[in-house]
Amino acid sequence: MAAKKNTMAIMAIGAIPLITTLGNSMLIPVLPAMKSSLKISQMQVSLTITVYSIAAAIFIPILGYLSDRFSRKIIIIPSLVLFSLGGIFSGIAAAFFSNPYIWIMIGRTIQGIGAAGTAPIAMALTGDLFKGGEQSRVLGIVEASNGLGKVLSPILGALFGLIVWYAVLFAFPILSILTVFLVWFFIREKGYRKAPPPFRKYALGLLSVFKLEGRWLFVMYLAGGTCLFTLFGILFYLSDILEEKHNLEGFIKGLVLAIPLLFMVTTAYITGGKIGKNLVRMKKIMLIGFSLMTISYCTLVLVEKLVPFLAVLALSSVGAGLSLPCINSMITGSVGKERRGFVTSLYGSVRFIGVAIGPPIFARLMDWSRAGMFLSIGALTILVFILILLLIKVKGLDGKENKNTRFRYKYI
């Protein structure tokens, strides 16, 4: 019975990032239809992704702090409800308002605020409920679930788009209901809080964490943000060229968009189950991951035909799938339960910022130069590779615990 409850708890945790990932990725297949219907520019349509992510990035640290003071569950459930309400508001605006763009943006902002209290806090919740290698395995499942949402979303988005493009907006609350019930019934935080710490004491504790661990945390935040920035930027680019150059629309377009994401989610799931708490192995895997991403992006300069393009792009997806579970595990294990919510939520903010700036920056780069676009992101990934190589000099664990960190990384 206990094993069954454990399985259901993992399902509940895994469902949280899956749903909130759909909040951005499901729109990608319908962006060209939205642009045409609302008569807006490429930059304006990209902002429907950006505003969601910026709102999430701003509110994630706030809700992360509240989850540390009270509980994860008490933040996650209302956040899922708010996420649903934002989708309903945007859908009603698109369907019935004469000038809906600004109202859609408001609804997307509400959705982003809701998303802020979900996936990042699910990572902290995983750190609370699971330990050791099991924690890394569940974090791998969380990242794989996040990736699965990205795989399913272009397919689901394309299917809903066959009805009308804004049908996607009404799909969000429908898909959220099951997650709310799973979290409500199967997540148990027994004995989780004795008393919320005063803000001053909490803030001083966070400062001590970043003083001790700030260098490698900065690199990990940058690495995670880079993975999401390049991923959503490439999806935005791919969605555009599939219609403009290859005349692929609807369900077929959704399937093609899902191909590189499928490579990422499969790799993330396998990686999460293999890394355990071996920090040296994590660093090696991240270096391999960013090497593959750099090679892929630089090679894409020379590749324009669709099938070879997707094959080379899959290499970068494998690289992201190798890197993200390692980043998640290192960040989640860096602090104790009492401050984990804020630290993982700050990481979530960086990820959402990566998602937010991806489409508009890629829109500008597409107008500038195709070759320049791929070489620029290749330069970014090689920079992250160098930072990991030079600044994450992990010897291992010191085997001790203190009030600020659950484990400390040793540096040369």
Image (spheres, helix red, strand yellow):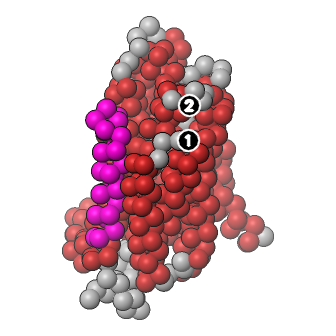
Q: Is residue 346 visible?
A: no
Q: Position of residue 133 (x, y in %)?
A: 57, 79
Q: Secondary structure at mark 1?
A: helix
As drawn, the residue found furthest toward the bottom would be 399
Image coords of residue 59 (percent x, y):
34, 46
Identify which residue is drawn at 47% across, 47% down: 303
Question: Foreground residue, 158 or 243?
Answer: 243
Alpha carbons under labels 2 and 1: distance apart: 8 Å
Crowd rating for badge 2 (residues with CA inside 10 Å; few <14, some 14–19, many 20+): few
The C terminus lies in quadrant: bottom left
Q: Look at mark 1 in the image and give the residue it sits on.
A: 306
Point out the tag, 2 or 1, that comes first from the N-terminus: 2
Q: Main secondary structure of the magenta part?
A: helix
Amino acid at circle 2: His
28 vs 116, nearest the viewer: 28
Q: Nearer the viewer, residue 375 or 62?
A: 375
- The quadrant of the image that shows the N terminus is bottom right
Query: What's the residue at 55%, 22% (across, down)?
Result: 166
- Per the image, the residue denoted by label 2 is 246
Query: Which span is picked out in magenta?
Result: 363-387
When the figure is inspected, residue 240 is found, relative to residue 271, above or below; the finding is above
* Camera sees residue 315: yes
Q: Is residue 401 left or right of residue 33?
A: left
- Residue 288 sits in quarter: bottom left
Look at the image and say whether residue 376 sits in the magenta stretch.
Answer: yes
Relative image position of residue 156 (x, y in whole percent)? 64, 36
